[in-house]
Amino acid sequence: MEAANLGANKADGQSIGLNISLPHEQNPNPYISENLNFEFHYFFMRKFWFVQLARALVVFPGGFGTLDEMFEVLTLMQTRKITHKVIVLMYSSEYWNKVLNLEFLAEKGMIDRNDLNLFHFVESPSQALDCLKNEICLDYTWQPD
């Protein structure tokens, strides 16, 4: 989130921060607009507001927290619990294809093959921006190796 907050800050825009209270290691980044810096005690409430406000999720390479948020959104989309359109872009197919083998899940029937269309890979900031501006990503649909 810090990269998005920094970009908005550099463009003199406002950006929101949805932080979680943890014993250590989590502090709001300095680029969040002061009036839009929210602190949550429970993960559930943070995720609820995160998804409720989101119109797009750009998932950059990351660890457990990133995977948790990405799968939460994909599961809500898969089960049609999100009532508005959310575009999910996964940045760097090279990274995500090493971390996840979603094709295997589809082959084994653990997810529907159509679930592979819930997200799209993008390889550059300009490709991500084009996708977000057009609100469709048909040119960037996930393709298994």
Image (spheres, rainbow, N blue to C red):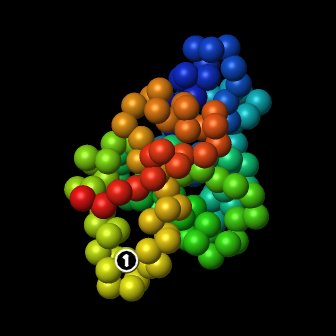
Q: Residue 143 versus residue 21: which sits nearer the camera? A: 143
Position of residue 28 measured from the top left corner of the image (x, y, whole percent)? 56, 36
Q: Residue at x 40, y 31 (%)?
A: 124
Is label 1 in a helix, a strand or a loop?
helix
> In this view, which residue lies farthest toward the bottom?
109
Residue 138 in the image, given as x and y percentages of width and height: 53, 49
Near mark 1 (Cα within 10 A), the count class, few <14, some 14-19 or many ≥20, is: some
Q: Is residue 104 above or below residue 3?
A: below
Residue at figure coordinates x 64%, y 53% from the top left: 86
Q: Position of residue 88 (x, y in %)?
A: 54, 51
Q: Is residue 38 visible?
A: yes
- Give the residue drawn at x 34%, y 68%: 102
Name the residue beneath numbered marker 1.
Answer: 106
- Residue that protrudes farthest toward the front in the picture: 139
Please identify the quadrant where the C terminus is shown: bottom left
Could you tell me if residue 50 is visible in this image?
A: no
Left or right side of 108 for 26: right
| Quadrant of residue 31 within the rendered picture | top right
Residue displayed at 61% across by 23% down? 8
Amino acid residing under circle 1:
Ala
Query: Would you place residue 5 above or below residue 69 in this image?
Result: above
Relative to 110, say whether 4 is above or below: above
Rendered location of residue 13, percent (x, y): 69, 20
Q: Is residue 75 left or right of residue 62?
A: right
Of 79 and 112, nearer the camera is 112
| Number of callouts | 1
